[in-house]
Amino acid sequence: MLADLRANLDDEALVRNTVEEMLRHDGALFMSMRVALQSFEWHGKQIEAGHRIFLYHLSANRDPRVFDEPDRFDIRRKDASRHIAFGYGIHFCLGAPLARLEVEVALPALLKRYPDLALADDAVAWKTNFVLRGPTSLMLSA
């Protein structure tokens, strides 16, 4: 995948789709919580007004009913942008367009400047946070 991206860094559509696939496959928002305003039944389970509901974004972004081979990272995935890495509806992240743009600009610039950029160590330590996700550090070699 990285070789494909490096060979096509001037393909804006591929870079944009790569960013979407990164968000779908390993987004930063692990989970969000909502409070039910009214009682309702969902998939045979009764949810009462006032109950907290935990929404697992990373799980939804790997739903096999939505994504073919959901655990496979594919920068050419046709439906990569169907993820909910930034939430959805009235809770959609206002900063999402800026975050996307930053990565769409920075990623090709970084890979052009450092064409041999790679992980220095495959063992990446992840934050132990129930809401936001990401590495505690990322050692790279150029």
Image (cartoon, helix red, strand yellow):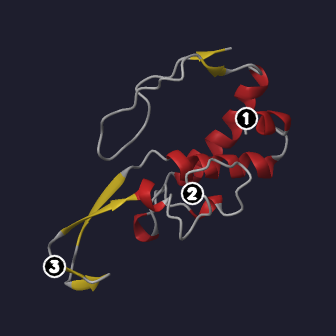
Count neighbours of disc 3 (C-alpha within 10 A) and say few if under 14, some if 14 to 19, many if 20 or more: few
The percent position of residue 41, horizontal first and vertical second, equals 25, 85
Q: Earlier in the sequence, mark 2 or mark 1?
A: 1
Give the spatial CA distance, label 3 vs label 2: 33 Å
What is the three-letter code of the residue carrying label 3? Ala
The percent position of residue 101, horizontal first and vertical second, equals 64, 46
Image quarter in which the C terminus is found: top right
Q: Residue at x 39, y 31 (%)?
A: 126
Q: Earlier in the sequence, mark 3 or mark 2?
A: 3
| SS at badge 2 | loop
Tag of residue 70? 2
- Above or below: residue 38 compared with residue 96: below
Q: Earlier in the sequence, mark 3 or mark 1?
A: 1
CB under 8 Å between discs 3 and 2: no
Tag of residue 2? 1
Q: Is residue 95 left or right of residue 109?
A: left
What is the three-letter code of the residue carrying label 2? Pro
Q: Is residue 68 left or right of residue 132?
A: right
Count neighbours of disc 2 (C-alpha within 10 A) and say few if under 14, some if 14 to 19, many if 20 or more: some
Tag of residue 24? none
Residue that label 3 marks: 49
